[in-house]
Amino acid sequence: MACDRQSSLKLPSYSKQSEIVPWQVSGMIHRNIDVIRCCSFLNHGKTVTAKQIGTRYLTGSGNAALPSRLAFAFDIDGVLIRGKNALPAAKEALSMLDGNNKFGLKIPFILLTNGGGVGEEERCRKLSSQLGVQIHPEQFIQAHTVLKSVVNKYADQPVLVLGGKGDTLRTVAEGYGFQQVYTTLDILAWNASIWPFHDLTQQERASVKTTDFSKIPFSAIFVFHDPRNWALDIQIMCDVIQSRGVIGSYRESNHMRKPVDLVFCNPDLIWQSDFEAPRMGQGAFKIAFQAVFQALTGSTYPHTQFGKPTEATYKFAEMMLKRHLPGVSTPSLYMIGDNPESDIAGANAAGWKSILVRSGVYDSRHGPPSHQPTHEAEDVAEAVYWALEQEMRS
């Protein structure tokens, strides 16, 4: 089993951004449930359907716990979006939290995903278009966002970044503050014999950074996002690690150099796309790499893991949420997700409340969830409504 060195990279306090997303409170929530929705809700201990409820109101004073303490974190794939399309319940849920109700109530929320591959601002623009609600970078954490917290350790050192298309993640990493960022395509362009089973396309060649990698001492490998070419990336990872950073050199003197740090950003084995069955994610790539490395060396390679459900990622998310709840020492935080292994496990360990939705990878037909949520719901709209009702009653 791989050694997980989560404690080796410490998280500093989340820096205050220049733009603050306004969260305004009011004393009442209005919930208009369409009579065609058949989601079940709790009514004084009895289960009733939307057809029986019709239009529902939740009321409370301006000092109620709901406006002052409540905040949400949402997974994206399988909760708000499936493939490239927003799920119908997503726009309803986020629109209500964003204040689009006749009382103007706004409740803080962030999006917390193990996805990635592009910059935060670009992804927020796309999500805003898909969901019909403005999403700001201050409301968004993807798998590799947390790497902003370790930039100081590696800022001026050569690092290898894996995943994404072309050199997109080079640009993202440089935006975080990493100054010497290289990709596996850069290395393949330097020496094609490293992996003779892939010929660089014209587009790939246009994206590479040319240098002599026999003189580049890598200090770390960051798997930002799901790699596109597993075989190439696993080969180069093994080369870099076994040579202690200077690829192609295997002299005994190399053992005097510090071992290369290895960081994965997303432990998810599977994720939900447009395809009917779940697809393999970065977690599957990590398993494949460790299996190959163990076959070569006799042991797996120690690594640091970020992403849900790790403690580091949930602490990072909690700091972001607390920025939107000034003066609240004990917020009531809800995680809504479709993956028991990441969304529910991480929220439970962090002391949050958790709601598991059935619109993504979780399938109740295969048995109970591996991690027990606070509540289960059919979709994100039902999940939000249930949470609001519970908070108003508390």
Image (spheres, rainbow, N blue to C red):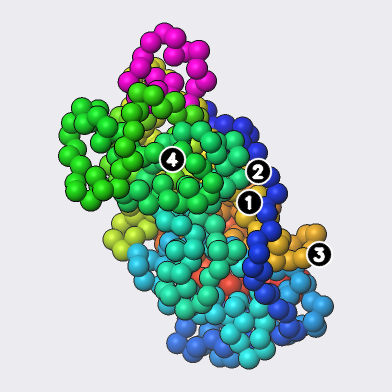
Secondary structure, mark 4, is: strand
Circle 2 crowding by C-alpha within 10 Å: few under 14, some 14–19, many from 20: some
Cα distance between the residues tagged 3 and 2 = 22 Å
Q: Which amino acid lies under the numbered mark 3 shown in the image of this protein? A: Gly
Of the numbered discs 1 and 3, the one sitting upstream in the chain is 1
Q: Which amino acid lies under the numbered mark 1 shown in the image of this protein? A: Phe
Cα distance between the residues tagged 1 and 3 = 18 Å
Cα distance between the residues tagged 2 and 1 = 8 Å
Residue that numbered label 4 is attached to: 181
Res 178 visible: yes
Residue that numbered label 3 is attached to: 327
Residue that numbered label 1 is attached to: 316
Residue at 21% over, 31% down: 192
Secondary structure, mark 3, is: loop
Task: Give yes or no for contact between labels 3 and 2 (Cβ–Cβ under 8 Å).
Answer: no
Task: Give yes or no for contact between labels 2 and 1 (Cβ–Cβ under 8 Å).
Answer: yes
Residue at 75% over, 84% down: 27
Which of the 4 quarters of the picture holds residue 130?
bottom left
Locate residue 172 relative to residue 65 in the image: left or right. Answer: left
Task: Give yes or no for contact between labels 4 and 1 (Cβ–Cβ under 8 Å).
Answer: no
Q: Which amino acid lies under the numbered mark 4 shown in the image of this protein? A: Val
